[in-house]
Amino acid sequence: MVNVILTLRIVQAVLAIIVLGLACYVVNFYNHIKISIDAANFLVFNSIWTFFALGYLVATPMFFPNFHNRWAVLGVEAITMVFWFAGFIALAVAINGMVCVGIHECPIPAARAATAFGAFEWLAWLSTLGLVVHALIQYRRSDPNDAGIESGITDPAGALDGEAATPSGLDVEMNGGPQFESKIEHGQQPSGPPHLPQLSDLGTGDEGLQNQPYGQPAIDGSGTLQMPDVGQYGGNGTHDEQPR
């Protein structure tokens, strides 16, 4: 299977070399007559910047993975795309003010070619930026906790030069008795808070003393005072005098 990202990286490098040569010719030509073309200078800068950007995007995931961050990749892609868009548009406008010196030397064709290749370079960077954004969106959908910023999951599409995403499930167990146990299966989210027992289920401990004031005989439902049976305490209900 063809790696689309790697193919586009090669195209970006080749186009950057072509634009660098053409833009340097235009800059060098006008330097001889003490004229500075800012748009051509900017395309020279864009080409050099592209080499550094490609070095980071291609080399860091293979040799320096600790320095490879998906958000840094997104930033480099976006900045480089904007640079090339501004560069080829600026040079296309500047061509109208260019002049030829002599009959055999004219930088205008080279400037036009640099503009055309710069436009193709911009399209190449726009394509890779779209793939990176798509991969980040897939991150957020595949990771239930965040989207891959803190979880360490790499993109599923390979646009960030990483491995396939492998989001792990959540396994939580609360210990504290059978009524407090709640376990979440692999890859599932909890449907609600753990079940807690009601106070009515546990009881209050005074069910038999509801109608009995403290220190007084019990009162039945009709409000009649119930005197205790002294026989249950070992007596016979009579008082016998003992001789002194």
Image (cartoon, helix red, strand yellow):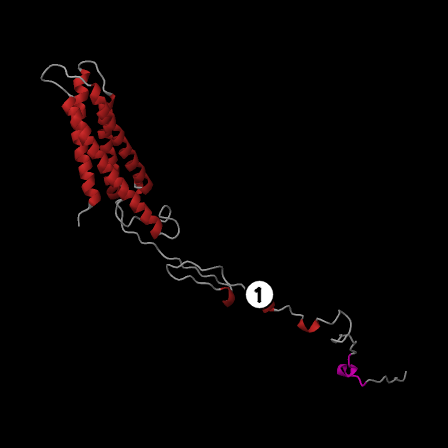
The answer to whether any part of residue 152 appears in the image is: no
- Residue labelled with disc 1: 198
Asked whether 117 or 150 is in front, the reply is 117
Q: Quadrant of residue 211?
A: bottom right
Quick check: 183 above or below 2? Answer: below
The answer to whether any part of residue 180 appears in the image is: yes
Q: Is residue 225 left or right of residue 25?
A: right
Q: Which residue is depicted at the point 30% across and 52% down?
A: 165
Q: Quick one: SS at disc 1?
A: loop
Asked whether 186 or 83 is in front, the reply is 83
Of all residues, the one furthest to the left in this rendering is: 104
Give x and y (percent) for residue 108. 16, 22
Q: Which residue is depicted at the point 19% across and 28% down?
A: 115
Residues in magenta, as a range: 228-236
- Circle 1: residue type: Gln
Of all residues, the one furthest to the front in this rendering is: 96
Q: Which residue is depicted at the point 13% across and 19% down?
A: 106
